[in-house]
Image (cartoon, rainbow, N blue to C red):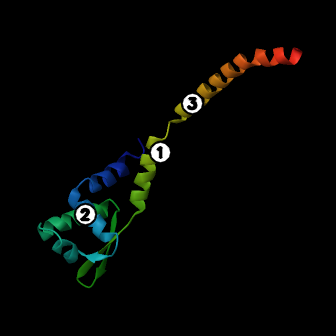
Amino acid sequence: MRYASWVDEVAGAIADPVRREILWMLRGEALTAGQVADRFAISRPAVSRHLRVLREAGLVRDTADGRRRVYELVTTPLDELAGWLEALRRPSGWQHHLDALTTEVYRTRRERRTGPEISTKESA
């Protein structure tokens, strides 16, 4: 499975409600680690661990601003995950071909039923 690694990493990162809330907060603005931590009732080291998981999954980018770390949302992995999920929902190649075959069988049956009636009318 070629997608397993990054799908697991991104899905694992967004599986946690705290990390989802952090992503939601960062969608509108870049925030320092302290600003993120201030919005939660958990310890700063715990928030730091959540930010590290998000960073390692490629969902946030951090830059240094003096002694502070500023975090911003990166949506590319979410777009890739959404594309993967959409592809998963689409019929497989074989299913598409089988659907086309089913359509062709019904069309052929319909033509066979209506075919003799048309030729009888034409010969009259």
At horizontal 40% and vertical 52% (from top left) the residue drawn is 81
- Residue 23 locus on image (x, y percent): 30, 65
Residue underneath mark 2: 21
At horizontal 34% and vertical 73% (from top left) the residue drawn is 28
- Residue 2 locus on image (x, y percent): 42, 44
Amino acid found under the numbered disc labelled 1:
Ala
Q: In this picture, is 3 found above or below 71?
A: above
Q: Are marks 2 and 1 in contact (CB under 8 Å)?
A: no
Nearest the camera: 9 or 79?
79
At horizontal 22% and vertical 57% (from top left) the residue drawn is 17
Indicate which disc, 3 or 1, sits on the residue closer to the N terminus.
1
How far is mark 3 from mark 2, CA to CA? 42 Å
Amino acid found under the numbered disc labelled 2:
Glu
Indicate which disc, 2 or 1, sits on the residue closer to the N terminus.
2
Residue underneath mark 3: 99
Q: In this picture, is 14 found above or below 104?
A: below
Toward which corner of the image does residue 49 lie, by quadrant? bottom left
Q: Is residue 121 left or right of residue 99?
A: right
Toward which corner of the image does residue 73 lie, by quadrant? bottom left
Q: In this picture, is 93 found above or below 106?
A: below
Decide: few, some or many residues near mark 1? Use Cα within 10 Å; few <14, some 14-19, many ≥20: few
Q: Are marks 3 and 2 in contact (CB under 8 Å)?
A: no
- Mark whose residue sits in front, 3 or 1: 3
How far is mark 3 from mark 1, CA to CA? 17 Å
